[in-house]
């Protein structure tokens, strides 16, 4: 898992405080947390991964939101939970930009790994 690279340009309403580039679609850390729990991840692990998604894995650029359309690691890590399609080939055909799909894939990866180790931004 890794940091995002591509974000679509969007006009800023306040050039002095808003970032120049924002993702096309965003969710809050709370929404990401709920999606992970609904997909089967325990609350504590979901809280850690949702925070990592906001802070490092798929930051929207405003310090508050998570980018659903995040792309990182040279196009290999996709979506809000940065699922690596080269390492998890079963996920390559999924819509990883959809929060529920990305959360479900993250839960599969979490279970396979026995924890949050696959995410680079998780302490």
Image (cartoon, rainbow, N blue to C red):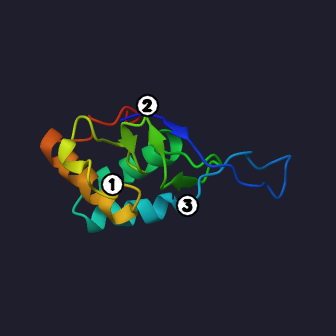
First in sequence, mark 2 or 3: give its number: 3
Residue that mark 2 sits on = 74
Figure label count: 3
Residue at image point 47% right, 34% down: 3
Report x, y in % for residue 119.
33, 37
Q: Element type at marker 2? A: loop
First in sequence, mark 1 or 3: give its number: 3
Snapshot quadrant of residue 115: top left
Residue at image point 21% right, 41% down: 88
Residue that mark 1 sits on = 46
Residue at image point 31% right, 61% down: 101
Query: Dot 2, how many residues are within 10 Å of its Cα: few (below 14), some (14-19), or many (20+)?
Result: few
Residue that mark 3 sits on = 25
Q: Element type at marker 3? A: loop
Does residue 106 appear in the picture of this structure?
yes
Query: Dot 1, how many residues are within 10 Å of its Cα: few (below 14), some (14-19), or many (20+)?
Result: many
């Amino acid at each position: 898992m890794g940091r995002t690279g591509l974000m679509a340009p969007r006009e800023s309403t306040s050039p002095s405080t808003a970032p120049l580039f924002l993702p096309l679609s965003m969710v809050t850390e709370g929404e990401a947390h709920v999606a992970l729990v609904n997909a089967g991840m325990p609350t504590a692990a979901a809280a850690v991964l949702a925070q990592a998604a906001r802070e490092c894995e798929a930051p929207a650029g405003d310090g508050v939101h998570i980018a659903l359309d995040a792309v990182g690691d040279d196009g290999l890590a996709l979506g809000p939970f940065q699922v690596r399609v080269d390492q998890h080939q079963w996920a390559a055909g999924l819509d990883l930009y959809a929060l529920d799909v990305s959360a479900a894939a993250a839960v599969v990866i979490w279970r396979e790994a026995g924890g949050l180790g696959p995410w680079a931004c998780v302490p």
